[in-house]
Image (cartoon, rainbow, N blue to C red):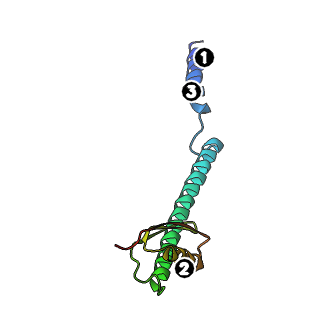
């Protein structure tokens, strides 16, 4: 009888531990798979943000080059160019409404530009 009691107690203590998922169990494998998928998703999102950042920098450079190459705008150095997903924003000061319009036209002609936000202000030279 004493042996049966010891066996019963040992069984009651060991049963909850045996019910826990072990390293090779389906539950553990499922959790590992979910963690791996989440990590892959985050890695891909980070890579996409990096690609987008490089794309924005390249587009900004192309627009700046086009503005610098335009004969009528060649002397303008006060134009700041930013881009985000094909949308170019022009900021700064120009000396005429014609220069403002021309800068926008030049930016719109650059490959990869989907739209232009022209926030240039006109200030006559003093």
Where does label 1 land, which residue? 4
Mark 3 Cα within 10 Å, few/some/many (few <14, many 20+)? few
* Closer to the eye: label 2 or 3: 2
Where does label 2 land, which residue? 106
Distance from the alpha carbon under mark 2 to that under mark 3: 77 Å
Which residue sits at x=59%, y=23%?
11
Q: Considering depth in this image, is 49 or 28 the residue closer to the camera?
A: 49
Distance from the alpha carbon under mark 1 to that under mark 3: 15 Å
Secondary element type, mark 1: helix
Where does label 3 land, which residue? 14
Q: Considering depth in this image, is 61 or 80 the residue closer to the camera?
A: 80
Secondary element type, mark 3: helix
Q: Quadrant of residue 74?
A: bottom left
* Residue 109 x, y percent position in the rendering: 59, 80
* Closer to the eye: label 1 or 2: 2
Q: Is residue 1 above or below residue 122?
A: above
Residue 77's disc is: none
The first of marks 2 and 3 along the sequence is 3
Q: Are circles 1 and 2 on residues that touch, CB within 8 Å?
A: no
Which residue sits at x=52%, y=77%?
98
* Residue 85 x, y percent position in the rendering: 57, 66
Mark 1 Cα within 10 Å, few/some/many (few <14, many 20+)? few
Which residue sits at x=41%, y=72%?
124
């Amino acid at each position: 009888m004493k042996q049966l009691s010891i066996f019963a107690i040992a069984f009651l203590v060991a049963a909850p531990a045996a019910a826990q998922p072990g390293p090779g169990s389906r539950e553990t494998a499922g959790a590992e798979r979910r963690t791996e998928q989440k990590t892959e998703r985050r890695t891909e999102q980070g890579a996409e943000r990096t690609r987008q950042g490089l794309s924005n920098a390249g587009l900004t450079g192309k627009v700046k080059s086009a503005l610098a190459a335009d004969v009528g705008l060649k002397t303008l150095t006060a134009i700041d160019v930013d881009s985000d997903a094909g949308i170019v924003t022009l900021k700064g000061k120009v000396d005429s409404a014609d220069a403002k319009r021309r800068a926008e036209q030049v930016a719109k002609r650059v490959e990869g530009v989907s739209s232009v936000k022209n926030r240039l202000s006109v200030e006559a030279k003093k």
